Image (cartoon, coloured by chain):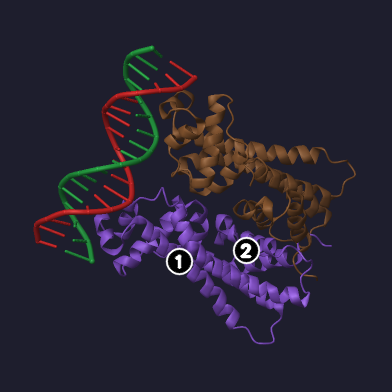
Chain colours: A purple, B brown, C red, D green
Amino acid sequence: MPDKIPVVHVDSKERILLSAARLFRDHGYSATTLRMIASLSEIKAGSIYYHFDSKESILIDVLNRGIEHVENEVRIRINALSSNSTFQDKVKTAIEGHLAGMLSNGDYTSANIKIYSQIPSKAKERHKIVRRAYADYWDSLFEEAFENGELREALNKDVFRLFVLGSLNWTTEWYEPKRGSFKELVDQVTSILFFGIFKK
Amino acid sequence: MPDKIPVVHVDSKERILLSAARLFRDHGYSATTLRMIASLSEIKAGSIYYHFDSKESILIDVLNRGIEHVENEVRIRINALSSNSTFQDKVKTAIEGHLAGMLSNGDYTSANIKIYSQIPSKAKERHKIVRRAYADYWDSLFEEAFENGELREALNKDVFRLFVLGSLNWTTEWYEPKRGSFKELVDQVTSILFFGIFKK
DNA sequence: GTCTATAAACTGATAGAC
DNA sequence: GTCTATCAGTTTATAGAC
């Protein structure tokens, strides 16, 4: 993942959120202290409380931005498609958007994906609704293909979406630009998901 | 995930390790306190130090057992295959083993997979060698197929293994027995990975 | 082997000066 | 808005009784 971009000097609130996202992603929510966030934001720990009520409210903002970001990356690309594009184009575009949302400047999104399962249950409950809406977006995308009979089998629809999105999500654990360009990654991942690993 | 099996009364050391694995998996390493581990193990926190030097040494043992467990699940199934089984049989068997290692009584393995990226870097460094050996096992499995020309494309070999294993690993985030039997999951996942989601 | 008690350090959060 | 100082609670880890 790039992240070459330093936590530049914009509004303090923005620096706090970006620092928190990166630290949450790399060390987890609980292992990240307010003093770590403060230090990376080049501010003192007490000052954080001028901008946020609690550590958990920072978390909520980070999580929401993560979904917001990835959803935008997907929607923008989908909306830019010409009206006569095939369904396969559409899905490949969505895959590219999702991967871009996580891997290219997607500090909030990668944080969201990596920490979600281990955050305090109260925060998880609050954030669930936002997540659900994004999942619904993918469901509606696949729904079309199910109806057209383009998909290879009538697999369980939930398993279908969960597996596809999950396989993408895990790329945060291993993708490094030095392995190959982002475009190559999208091509290879799409190729495997569309047609599998075997010749026939 | 089942985990119906309570932390039964075996050796204290075993109870501590199993409790730790489950708590690490569900809450993360840092958010899990020794008092939580002690409580679930039905022992007092101070007593843990008779069996372990530090919290981190519990972590190391949990991580190692995780790889050990999943590796066994895979090896046992692979070795039980008849000598005339096809390469696809072999891979499906390995997938089944890996999923079983995580999802069926795989507390140590699911803990390992979920927390690895966020543990202290010292522990990560120490555990890397054990992980590498398991990755090598999968590499050698696919190597055969590459040479036989059975795989659909000459994709980047690393991306290949990482994507396949990663897509399996993420099932810990969403698989629930109520969605369907374990056998069904193996069939559906294998089907997608082997031949993709599209009809052609 | 397990307990109680406690040390030493760290945590999220607050108060009040500037 | 940001700082310093500090509170109250928690954390890992240790000491010593049984």
Q: Which residue lies furthest to the right in this view?
A: B84
Q: Position of residue A186 (x, y in %)?
A: 63, 68
Identify which residue is drawn at 87% across, 46% down.
B85
Identify which residue is drawn at 41% across, 55% down.
A23
Depth order, front residue of A199/A81 = A81
Residue count near mark 2 (Cα–Cα under 10 Å), binned few <14, some 14–19, many ≥20: some
Q: Which mark is residue A64?
A: 1
Q: Which mark is residue A165?
A: 2
Q: Residue furthest bottom?
A: A83
**Chain under numbered label 2:** A
**Cα distance in 3D space between marks 2 and 1:** 18 Å
As helix, strand or loop, the secondary structure at mark 2 comes to: helix
Q: Which mark is residue B177?
A: none
As helix, strand or loop, the secondary structure at mark 1 comes to: helix
Residue count near mark 1 (Cα–Cα under 10 Å), binned few <14, some 14–19, many ≥20: some
- Are labels 2 and 1 assigned to the same chain? yes
Q: Where is residue C6 in the image (x, y as percent from the top left)?
A: 27, 26
- Specify the amino acid type for callout 2: Leu
Total of numbered circles in the picture?
A: 2
Task: Give the side of residue A145 with respect to residue A48, left or right.
Answer: right
- Specify the amino acid type for callout 1: Asn
Q: Where is residue B68 in the image (x, y as percent from the top left)?
A: 64, 36
**Chain under numbered label 1:** A
Q: Earlier in the sequence, mark 2 or mark 1?
A: 1
